[in-house]
Image (cartoon, helix red, strand yellow):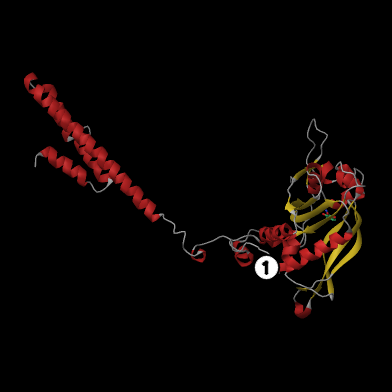
Amino acid sequence: MTEPDQLIAAIDAAASLDALEAIRVAALGKAGSVTALMKTLGQMAPELRLTEGPRLNALRDAVSTAIAARKTALEAAALDARLASERLDMTLPVAATPTGSIHPISQVMDELAEIFADLGFAVATGPEIEDDWHNFTALNMDENHPARAMHDTFYFPDTPGSDKRMVLRTHTSPVQIRTMLTQKPPIRIIAPGRTYRSDSDATHTPMFHQVEGLVIDRGITMGHLKWTLETFVKAFFEVDEIELRLRPSYFPFTEPSAEVDVGCSWAGGTLSIGGSESWLEILGSGMVHPRVIEACGLDPEEYQGFAFGCGIDRLAMLKYGMTDLRAFFDGDARWLRHYGFRGIDVPTLSGGVGA
Ligand code: DAH
């Protein structure tokens, strides 16, 4: 083999990009062998240069082309190797792969959406930074209403040039207003989401979760409210026989208003839902106040409705047995491993919504 043939053979046999680069430097680099040959052209007699010039140029081109081709081949092989090593077998059982877990609050929100979807309710949302009008005024709590003081509201500083006072919403009830302003009856929605109050102890956190329910149509009565809540509580706690107790109460945005307790027992020291030995308060509810319906531009003579509001964190604690509300928000991986849900445990009514 001639020297150029040996060089090309070495290029073709280079086992790695590093080895190839070493060959390139040794041949085409500043002190490379081909570069040295090219330099001899300058001192050559013109007749010799006439034949040697094209020959050396051809050699240099052949070496460059061979290096480029080998480089492409080595890069393709490296990519193939990488793709093979990073391959995911999508047919592997899920349990064999490491997984995160669904937070109990997210799980319960999914369960609520599933239960209420079956009853014809859509999921509605609203902003967490809300204005005073949607959070209070339109819900029949004007500026001086004493109920405003009960909400321990987080207020934003005034915005220069705007008379809107912004708050972190203290409940999900403003979503009732937003829904009635943008949709025509019949309305059937639930609105799960974050809510905020300046309050913190073992049973209160500054951020917590509520779900709002709203039905607006013609001829809606407390009977519809009670049936809906019974159906919801049975499906949620997965108990066929439950007792609900509606206690007269007061909320500015409902008339009449009722707080709802579910019958339970503490036999053996553990909570079980059902019976009427003991009672647990689970939500507030009532018939939507005519003034609220009016504030949303609907005629209260024509349309009636019911609403309810319920703490999601508490629902989760009752169903899944957590004892300290604050743990929900600690982000402790051990707690999440214990109480979290697998991503594929999607709530379905047919399978029982709970995990
Ligand atoms: N918004 C109320 C609260 O946070 C809960 C509530 C009570 C909502 C009665 C309702 C309702 O829709 O009808 O305390």
Pointer 1 residue Cβ closer than 8 Å to ligand 1: no
Quadrant showing the C terminus: bottom right
Quadrant showing the N terminus: top left
Residue lying at 84% horizontally and 66% vertically, measured from the top left: 261
Figure quarter occupied by ligand 1:
bottom right
For residue 249, side relative to residue 214 (left or right): right
Q: Position of residue 219 (x, y in %)?
A: 88, 54
Q: Mark 1 points at which residue?
A: 352
Mark 1, residues whose alpha carbon is within 10 Å: few (<14), some, or many (≥20)? some
| 187 and 70: which is toward the camera | 187
Count of numbered badges drawn on the protein: 1
Residue lying at 72% horizontally and 59% vertically, measured from the top left: 118
Q: Position of residue 56 (x, y in %)?
A: 14, 29
Residue 140 showing in the rendered view: no
Determine the image quadrant of residue 44.
Answer: top left
| 301 and 283: which is toward the camera | 301
| 223 and 320: which is toward the camera | 223
Residue 214 versus residue 96 in the image, above or below: above
For residue 66, side relative to residue 143 (left or right): left
Residue lying at 84% horizontally and 74% vertically, measured from the top left: 278
Residue 64 versus residue 180 in the image, above or below: above
For residue 97, side relative to residue 20 (left or right): right
Determine the image quadrant of residue 26.
Answer: top left
Q: Which residue ends up furthest to the top in the rendered image?
A: 46
Residue 292 versus residue 41 in the image, above or below: below
Circle 1: residue type: Gly
Q: Where is residue 282 in the image (x, y as percent from the top left)?
A: 81, 63
Q: Where is residue 289 in the image (x, y as percent from the top left)?
A: 90, 50
Q: Label 1's element?
A: loop
